[in-house]
Image (spheres, rainbow, N blue to C red):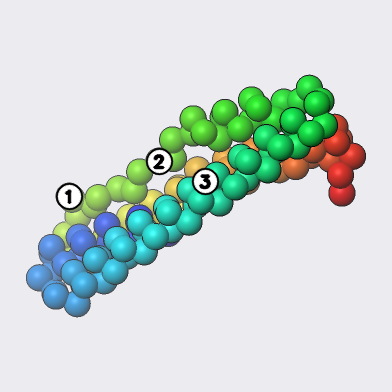
Amino acid sequence: MYKVHKNYWLRLSETNSNDEDHKRHLDKSDSSFETLRVIREVMSDYYKTATQFIIIYKAKSKIPGLLLEIKNFVPLKAAEYKNLVLYEDIKKAANDDEAKLNENYKFYSKKFDEIYTEMKLKFKIY
């Protein structure tokens, strides 16, 4: 997960003054922004598709509420590891942070699965 990796490399570069670690931080930062751009684009397309299903089939469903939940969801931020100095501690904190964020992001999968199930049931798609 890029947002964890960028903070990990930044902290390593701060603790050991390694230019290579700082370059990796910048690279992960760029990758993080690119990933966010792609996610926003895909989410926009998904919203359009789900909204079209609702309009075309004129069926009452829980999809608008699920889309609103997705829109209002605020994922956790990555930790910054400011109080850590030792490589082993930074590495462990980054691994723990990444696991926590991955669990947090499962929210999206759960909601998309609920929308898909609703479409199958209400709109008889397969």
Which residue in the protein does label 3 denote?
105
Which residue in the protein does label 1 denote?
83
Is disc 3 in contact with disc 2, using a CB cutoff of under 8 Å? no
Measured along the vertical axis of the image, is residue 87 above or below residue 68? below
Q: Residue at x 70, y 30 (%)?
A: 63
Earlier residue among tags 1 and 3: 1
Amino acid on which disc 3 is placed: Tyr
Kindly tell me whether residue 2 is visible in this rendering: no
Image quarter for residue 46? top right
- Residue at the front extreme, as displayed: 56
Q: Residue at x 59, y 47 (%)?
A: 45
Determine whether the residue tagged by mark 3 lies in a helix, strand or loop.
Answer: helix
Is disc 1 in contact with disc 3, using a CB cutoff of under 8 Å? no
Measured along the vertical axis of the image, is residue 82 above or below residue 17? above
Measured along the vertical axis of the image, is residue 20 above or below residue 125? below
Image quarter for residue 17? bottom left
- Residue at the right extreme, as displayed: 124
Amino acid on which disc 1 is placed: Asn
Which residue in the protein does label 2 denote?
76
Question: Which quadrant of the rendered structure holds the N terminus?
Answer: bottom left
Amino acid on which disc 2 is placed: Leu
Q: Residue at x 51, y 51 (%)?
A: 41
Q: Nearer the viewer, mark 2 or mark 1?
A: 2
Q: Residue at x 67, y 35 (%)?
A: 51
Q: Between marks 3 and 2, how big is the CA–CA gap?
A: 8 Å
